[in-house]
């Protein structure tokens, strides 16, 4: 493995200068192109002419990957075990190879759908109260289980926005969304969303 | 003037650069988040496995948009899109997408 040091010379194509240029390896703060932050002090190949970062050597990629991990957020909640059963039942409807990752796919799909609904706040409040009312008839204890996902910051923001407009806590929003999945995808014999979801999953898995 | 190389040599050098971690990722002052080399989703070994499977029919070569004397190699295999060029002795990856 070749390791470059600060001050080493190289060459690269500079998109700003539109030319093949001489470069120098220097430490720079380099931003992500999706506006999610930057990686501080990584060794980068810098155009000698315009000062732009034109390339990043392999030795700097572990720092970028670590920084990228930090820009992923965790979404965690303790929910009744029955909510997880709903998610898993929905997952088996959309894929023959249903697995834990389909839970996240379903939540993402319904959160996105809800985020586009101007009445989402009221709808979520209603869904959550319906979910709460679905207590077992007999006095039996339903254990709570932990749901945990790694999500993008965009998703986290959409989710936080749903909590804000509904006045619910994040766990309550999650339970509302799960209840929507139950009503939309698990209970109906021929769910309207099913063909679209199956097609999306099949595309992702192809 | 870059020396012209064909598919077999391009494949060999790309794999060697990935294996020895002697490559660079071409950027435009920002880190391209869609380039999988910048993400945690795949490793160099995964990309080597894809390139190893490539045959001549999966390879395309075209002049770089800006510097026409530099050949850009494009590999398409199993939904992967891998684009790179060489500036002796360096290997630059422009895209590793899926």
Image (spheres, helix red, strand yellow):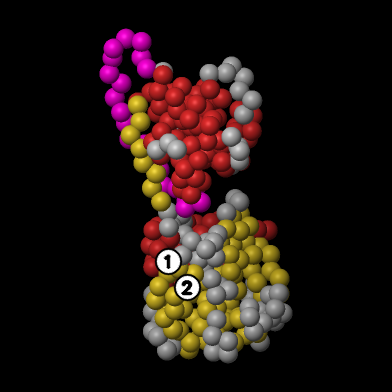
Farthest residue, direction top: A138
Quadrant holding the C terminus of chain B: bottom right
Asked if residue A12 lies left or right of residue A30, the reply is right
Residues beneath discs 1 and 2 located on the same chain: yes
Above or below A129: residue A37: below
Q: Residues within 10 Å of mark 2 (few under 14, many from 20)?
A: many
Residue to which mark 2 is pinned: A30
Magenta span contains residue B97 = no
Residue A64 badge: 1
Instruction: Tell me where residue A33 appears, x and y as whole percent.
Output: 54, 65
Q: Residue at x 39, y 66 (%)?
A: A62
The chain letter under disc 1 is A
Q: Is residue A204 visible?
A: yes
Element assignment for label 1: helix
Q: Where does the magenta region start and end?
A: A135-155
Q: Residue at x 37, y 17 (%)?
A: A135
């Amino acid at each position: 493995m070749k390791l470059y040091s600060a001050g080493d010379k190289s060459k690269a194509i500079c998109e700003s200068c539109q030319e093949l240029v001489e470069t120098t390896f220097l430490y720079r703060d380099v931003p992500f192109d999706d506006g999610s932050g930057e990686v501080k002090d990584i060794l980068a190949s810098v155009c000698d002419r315009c000062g732009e970062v034109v390339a990043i050597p392999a030795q700097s990629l572990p720092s970028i990957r670590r920084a990228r991990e930090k820009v992923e957020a965790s979404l965690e909640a303790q929910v009744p075990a029955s909510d997880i059963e709903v998610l898993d039942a929905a997952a088996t409807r959309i894929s023959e190879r249903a697995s834990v990752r389909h839970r996240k796919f379903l939540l993402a799909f319904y959160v996105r759908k809800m985020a586009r609904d101007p009445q989402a706040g009221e709808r979520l409040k209603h869904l959550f109260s319906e979910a709460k009312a679905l207590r077992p008839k007999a006095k039996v204890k339903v254990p709570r289980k932990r749901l945990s996902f790694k999500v993008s910051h965009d998703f986290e923001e959409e989710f936080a926005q749903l909590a804000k407009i509904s006045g619910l806590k994040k766990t309550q929003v999650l339970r509302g969304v799960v209840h929507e999945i139950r009503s939309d995808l698990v209970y109906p014999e021929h769910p309207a969303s099913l063909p679209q979801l199956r097609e999306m999953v099949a595309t992702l898995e192809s | 003037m870059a020396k012209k190389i064909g598919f077999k040599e391009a494949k060999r050098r790309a794999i060697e650069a990935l294996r020895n971690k002697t490559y660079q990722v071409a950027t435009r002052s920002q880190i391209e988040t869609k380039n999988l080399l910048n993400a945690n989703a795949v490793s160099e070994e995964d990309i080597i496995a894809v390139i190893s499977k490539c045959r001549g029919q999966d390879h395309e070569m075209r002049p770089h948009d800006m510097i026409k004397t530099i050949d850009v190699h494009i590999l398409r295999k199993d939904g992967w899109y891998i684009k790179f060029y060489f500036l002796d002795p360096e290997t630059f990856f422009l895209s590793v997408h899926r």
